[in-house]
Image: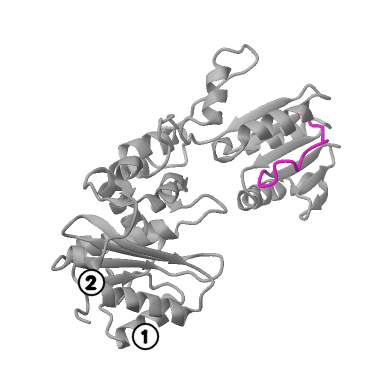
Amino acid sequence: MQDILINAALNSSNPVAWFAPTYRMLLDNWRVVRNTLAPVTARASDSEHRLDLVTGSVIDMWSLDNHDAARGRKYALICINEAAMIARLQESWEMVIRPTLADYQGRAYFASTPKGLNYFYTLCQQAETQSDWATFHFRTADNPHIKPSEIDEMRRMLPASTFKQEIEAEFMADGSYFQNVESAAVIDAPDLPAQHAGHTILMGVDWGKQNDWTVITVACRSCNRVVDWQRFNQIDYHIQRGRLAAMVKDWNPLAVLPERNSIGSVLIDELERDGVPIMAGPDGLSGWNTTATSKADIIEALHMALVRDDFQVPRDYADELRAYEIEIRAGAPKFGAPSGQHDDRVISLALCWRAMLDMTPAIIGW
């Protein structure tokens, strides 16, 4: 769709605009458009994300993190990128963006991978019955730059519903990555350790401090359910370590699988010195080193746990599970929470489930 924007700007002196769901995505789009049009740019403003071309046309680029940013403007063409990811797409379109087209009787393009049956889906349905609208459907396989072997690999590794939505660009009733959340997230309150005496207990830990949260998830392999959990932030790491140690003492787990990245490695060393049973990751080192590949492994395993293995989790985790996204970049899946949201519960839960699957700790005992 960037080609549409660029061609419109090169062949007209009228102003055009590009909208992205988040500021991060805007920056990616801005760099591509700015570099492509550098030979015909009279003035470029990185702070305003605005290009003045030698043709007389102007390109404004906006993030819809601020839904009112483009009020009072006027454009001959607008392009809305990844429209299905925009939290308030209907409000942004009807109250802000659509009025900017009135002066020039302008055109609008919406492009996106589907995400459930939200307002982007509504627009596509409406376009089927309106003579001045049109819809176009392109699958990943229609991209000549992506090898068929990559698509075959994603078909093999992704859940069928995810493949249909992300690769085939089909609208799915439940557009989130995790399925069966309503049936799985049924636990209202933690259990007591005495209720699981003699059972196999595992724990997963995702560390955080300032903007992120630390989440500790405790699960019973014998009962196939989460039995206890804590979430907190803006607490010094030695206090966080103390809270984890207290939960370990209460539950006497077979092993704990904490994230190793960043400060995690230091905390793991201290926990091991205190006798906490830390599980080894695939590389044989204590804790889990999160990379793009290893994250995909635990997230996909958690997906199957909810769909196939009847793993029961707290209701507190449901919103994060529903919101969790998969984005396809350069033919590879990238997992994470939507911009501005957290995935600490999901990662802690995924680590806990991985520990339940492995049950081969590097150290046993307390």
Total numbered labels: 2
181 vs 364: above or below: above
Which residue in the protein does label 1 denote?
Answer: 270
Q: Percent from the top left, x then y, of residue 192?
A: 26, 64
Q: Quadrant of the N terminus?
A: top right
Viewer-nearest residue: 150 or 339: 339
Query: Do the residues under discs 2 and 1 have CB atoms within 8 angstroms?
Result: no
Q: State the predominant SS element of the stretch in magenta.
A: loop
Q: How is the image coloured?
A: one colour
Q: Residue at x 50, y 36 (%)?
A: 113
In the picture, residue 349 is in which quadrant? bottom left
Q: Percent from the top left, x then y, of residue 191?
A: 27, 61
In space, the residues marked 2 and 1 are separated at their CA atoms by 18 Å
Q: Residue at x 31, y 62 (%)?
A: 228
**Residue range corresponding to the magenta coloring:** 64-76
Q: Secondary structure at mark 2?
A: loop
Which residue in the protein does label 2 denote?
Answer: 253
Residue 68 among magenta residues: yes
Q: Amino acid at mark 1?
A: Glu
In the picture, residue 365 is in which quadrant? bottom left
Q: Amino acid at mark 2?
A: Pro
Pick whichever of labels 2 and 1 is earlier in the sequence: 2
Q: Is residue 116 visible?
A: yes
Circle 2 Cα neighbour tier, 10 Å, few/some/many (<14 / 14–19 / ≥20) = many
Q: Is residue 109 left or right of residue 10?
A: left
Viewer-nearest residue: 10 or 82: 82
Viewer-nearest residue: 341 or 24: 341
Q: Is residue 285 visible?
A: no
Residue 300 among magenta residues: no
Q: Residue furthest bottom?
A: 273
Q: Residue at x 69, y 28 (%)?
A: 94
Q: Is residue 224 left or right of residue 36?
A: left
